[in-house]
Image (spheres, rainbow, N blue to C red):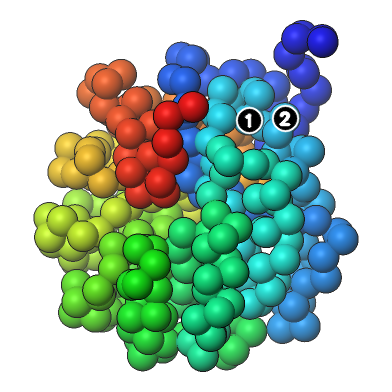
Amino acid sequence: MNNVPDSRPVPHSVGIDRPAHDLPPDACDSHMHIFDPRFAPSPHWTRQPPHADVAAYRRLQQRLGTSRTVVVNPSTYGTDNACTLDALAQLGERARGVAVVGHQVADSELDALAAQRVCGLRVNFVTPQSWGTTTPEMLTTLARKVARLGWHVQVFVQPEQLVALAPVLAALPVPLVIDHMARIDPAEGVKGEAYAVARRLLDGGNTWMKLSGVYMRSRDGAPAYGDAFALGRALVTAAPERLVWGSDWPHTTEAPDTVNDADLADVLAAWCDSTAVRDRILVDNPAKLYGFTAA
């Protein structure tokens, strides 16, 4: 077998460098998407999806040093999870899935998803959805339906939506996972109302945060996204036991060829005051949240 590392550029990821410090065994990329041209996008989606298949993602794993992953069904496919389920079948036991379903989903469909290593639902309040406007009632309905499965519910929200939804989010009967640091503007950072709400939710013990998508609001940009440092460090200090990290590959919110995934791993390391904290976020926390077991 040829064990020479693949040095070719990874599609949708700038550069060929590796993280400055090796990631630990069983490191998990807890937020990424697969787009495969074999699967048609939802009619509601007007943008051309990228070609970002499992083969390309495996090259990113090799470059970064991750071995576990969480495939999040993108809004591109609406409530059709076929592409994500196909990716889970290819990636095997070291992968978990987060699906998108309508609020009228049947228990039998949820059971079928669970049998294929889906362990949560994503509810998106930010980008267009196949059902139209996402409402708090949809969120609470879905949370009640998946409680019996031990799943979590993941929300993608704007900062002002996080503030408005705070009472609903705090009352959910399942663990809550907040996407992309709630898109909190680094210019407001820890001084803003959205951070205060996020802290209250984290302090409540039932909420997790994804340290991902740092580029979405950063004005400083790559490689260090320095304006987000205070926010990232504050989150790591506040709740190191309920944070996970994700690449957000293939970075569909950004202009093509602008994101270096090795930079994103280095940003996480900079936010952590020790390797032990970084490794907890990359290994122990996702193992608990997503149900990974020792290899």
Q: 25 or 127: which is nearer to us?
A: 25
Task: Report the residue marked by disc 2.
Answer: 59
Mark 1 packing: few (<14 Cα in 10 Å), some, or many (20+)?
some
Amino acid under label 1?
Gln
Task: Report the residue marked by disc 1.
Answer: 61
Vertical relation: 18 (above or below) 286:
above
Mark 2 packing: few (<14 Cα in 10 Å), some, or many (20+)?
some
Which numbered dot is residue 202?
none
Q: Residue at x 62, y 64 (%)?
A: 74
Q: 83 or 118: which is nearer to us?
A: 118
Query: Mark 1 and mark 2: span between their CA atoms?
Result: 5 Å
- Mark 1, secondary structure of its residue: helix
Q: Quadrant of residue 273?
A: top left
Q: Position of residue 120 (x, y in %)?
A: 45, 63
Q: Quadrant of the N terminus?
A: top right
Q: 180 or 4: which is nearer to us?
A: 4
